Image (cartoon, rainbow, N blue to C red):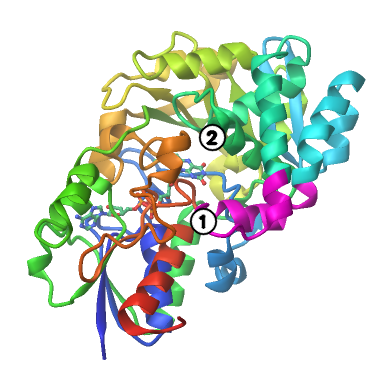
Amino acid sequence: MSSVAVIGAGTNGLSAACVAARAGLDVTVYEANDTIGGAARTGPLAGSDAVFDLGSAVHPMAMLSEAFHALRVHERVDFLVPELSYAHVAGDHTAYAWHDLQATLDYLPKTEAVVYERIIRPLVQRIDSLGDTLLNPLLGLPRHPVTLAAFGASTVAGMGLLQGWPGRYPHAAALLAGCAAHVAGGSRGPAGTGAGLFLAAAAHGAGWAIPRGGSQAISDALASELHENGGRIETGRRIEDLRELDQEVFLLDTSPETAAVLGAGRIPDTLQRRLAAPRRSPGSCVVHYVLDGPVPWRDPVVAQAGTVHLGGDARQVLAAERSSRHRAAAEPFVLVAQPSQFDSSRSAQGHHVLWAYCHVPLGSNQDMSRRITAQLEAAAPGFRDLVREEYVRTATDLERQNAALVGGDISGGTMDLIGSVLRPRLSPSPWWLQGPGMYLVSSAVPPGPSVHGMGGYRGAQHMLAREFGIGR
Ligand SMILES: Cc1cc2nc3c(=O)[nH]c(=O)nc-3n(C[C@H](O)[C@H](O)[C@H](O)COP(=O)(O)OP(=O)(O)OC[C@H]3O[C@@H](n4cnc5c(N)ncnc54)[C@H](O)[C@@H]3O)c2cc1C
């Protein structure tokens, strides 16, 4: 039987392994950590009885992922979809992105509702084909030309809203800016706005899902699928050199930098040099809280949101993001997830877990807990008094926790226009590293970051066709 090695047991690596194992290949996954999941892991932190999402917490792309449907993740994971996908708190005002688009429009001031609907409805109506378009490489024949055209038009209008009239349409602009700011560094261009629109459309389309039990449930579901198809996983095994392994085909769920090291002598020098020095996004600093009760939001509706955006109006959010490239913002844009509001298994003994992070310069060791707590306190007076435990993971800690998060960059490289297309090279089949049996399948290839497994799923399909003529 032909054998394949997968380096890294993140959701992309596990998805790739499942595809290869289902095709009848002998598959082994090698994972440096003692547990699987990479940036989709849930586990304890020393000194606490609670379990925390160590990476992802809320999963906008999981519902749209062809990989997760095909690999039976949806059969194995109980996805909880909050009715209020996210809330954006700016001073005394809150903007709500309900799963139901009409409810969102009903809450917006009339003039803002007209603008928001014009931009977002064409995408929400086409959410499945939009997912199919954007969760695949963009180069090549467009899969859904009408959807792509609608996306282009909405992106232009969204850029106008964010850059031209954020003061005139403050709620609509805040809803979009908060999503655009998920892309670290606050890209002004079409890529940041487009990514934001995709997230916002997903909020009203499929919803922003929280897996019962935490993000680990997704990784475990993929591992079950792999085991059922005869694949193996070796944890606690960091691969430093591919000569350690007997296989001749390698699917790398790693950073580009690691791919450059592992690919030495196997891939062309020019590509190896590009992989060794990728364009990177800012890093992130995460704070995990255990609270004595639910967050006392000033606006009680916010308690219904799976995700909360803090950090002011659209202009302030985008300014904080741009500043995060060079220095941490005094009042950062903060992403908050409150899983224990929806999943009782996460609120042991009446305690609540809360996950919050902000962007910081790449490789920063700065502890942002005071600034993040200050943002939470401003939106929820009395928050500080509820904090029972607090654990900080700086950008450098994130890399220690997972070698793929170089400098704490959780995006696998920049997600501006160039970074989205040159990922890692301009090609309709970007996974192949132009050397025998060498494939990169992590978030450093299209479609990029987020928990969807699509980089691994498509990368492995391409590998099967190229190496074994399967499914060509
Ligand atoms: C703090 C944080 C918050 C996030 N929030 C969200 C969110 O809410 N929603 C969302 O959708 N996405 C979120 N993301 C992004 C998302 O988690 C990632 O984009 C996605 O999980 C990446 O999957 P991956 O398989 O490409 O890589 P990873 O999950 O990073 O997996 C790579 C694996 O490879 C292993 N590895 C690396 N090098 C080697 C080696 N040499 N030998 C063996 N093993 C190796 C690593 O240990 C790791 O397990 C977040 C990420 C982080 C870090």
* Residue 51 visible in the displayed image: no
In the image: residue 100, left or right of residue 245: right
Mark 1 secondary-structure assignment: loop
* Residue 438 visible in the displayed image: yes
Q: Is mark 1 within 8 Å of ligand 1?
A: yes
- Which of 268/115 is in front? 268
**Location of residue 292 in the rendering, given as x and y in whole percent from the top left corner:** 55, 29
In the image: residue 255, left or right of residue 380: left
- What residue is rendered at 36% in x and 48% in y? 444
Q: Amino acid at mark 2?
A: Ala
Q: Amino acid at mark 1?
A: His
- What residue is rendered at 42% in x and 13% in y? 323
Q: Which mark is residue 191?
A: 2
Displayed quadrant of residue 383: top right
The quadrant of the rendering that contains the N terminus is bottom left
- What residue is rendered at 42% in x and 37% in y? 418
Pointer 1: what residue? 452
**Location of residue 355 in the rendering, given as x and y in whole percent from the top left corner:** 49, 34
Q: Which residues are magenta?
A: 124-149
